[in-house]
Image: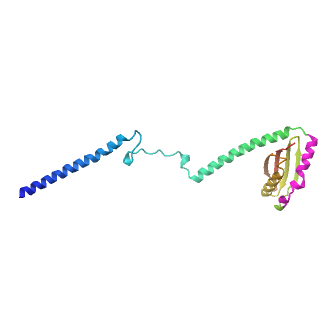
Amino acid sequence: MRIRSSLVFLVAAIALVVGLTWWHARKAAAPKVAEAAVPAGVLPDATPATHRPVATPPPDALRLPRAERSRERHARQRAAVARVNAVGREKIVGRYESENIDPAWSNATRQALMAPSLAASDQIRATHSEPSGLAVDCRSTTCRITADFPNRIAADDWSTFYLTGAGDRLPNATLRKTTNPDGSVRLEIYAIARR
């Protein structure tokens, strides 16, 4: 009986070793079959992480924080707009400087652009942005308008209301603000006027 129980134990141990060996061999062969079925260059989800390709880090520009990338993009956009505005301004200023004067048109347009209903409208008075030293000089298709203001806000308000009111007469205009020695602001507008 002792031999029989030893024999049963030995058979059970051999069966266990054979079973484990077979199970381990089957498990090791399974990924190879899966890899063969996957197209070249594509890794199945079962691929160990150590065998997956390492992603290359993004360029330095992409590593910047989102806010900094946004600021840089806006700065580039502002610079592009400034270049376009400068080209447009040079074009209108050059046209104004090279034009001959048409006295009849020049005087009529000047008077219309200096009219109190336009230069000192109710909205302009309500915002306390009346200009001082308003001057309008027109040629044959272009005009230069200059005025002084106590601060930049008043110059912005006045130019917005003025150009909105004069929009039918001045469809194309370019503005420049400079600070005077006393801290006041000088506004200079060059515009192409309708005939």
Q: How is the image coloured?
A: rainbow
Question: Does residue 104 belong to the magenta stretch?
Answer: yes
Position of residue 174 in the picture relative to residue 35 (left or right): right
Q: Quarter holding the N terminus?
A: bottom left
Task: Give left or right: position of 46 versus 64.
Answer: left
Q: Residue at x 71, y 43 (%)?
A: 83
Q: Is residue 28 visible?
A: yes
The picture places residue 152, in percent across and down from the top left corner, at 78, 56
In the rendered structure, does residue 46 fall within the stretch colored magenta? no
Q: Residue at x 74, y 44 (%)?
A: 85
Query: Disc count in the image?
Result: 0
Taking the spot 65% from the left edge, 46% from the top edge, the residue there is 76
Front residue of this view, candidates 98 and 172: 172
- Pinpoint residue 51: horizontal percent, then vertical percent: 38, 45
Magenta span: predominant SS is helix
Direction right: furthest residue: 104
Residue 190 place in picture, x, y as percent:
82, 45
Instruction: Please identify the quarter of the rendering in which residue 160 is found.
Output: bottom right
* 55 on left or right of 47: right
Examine the rendering and report whether any part of residue 180 can be seen.
no
Which quarter of the image is occupied by the C terminus?
A: top right
Name the residue at the front extreme.
Answer: 37
Which segment is the magenta one? 102-125
Q: Residue at x 70, y 45 (%)?
A: 81
Foreground of the two, 148 or 89? 89
Does residue 64 appear to the left or right of 14 in the view shown? right
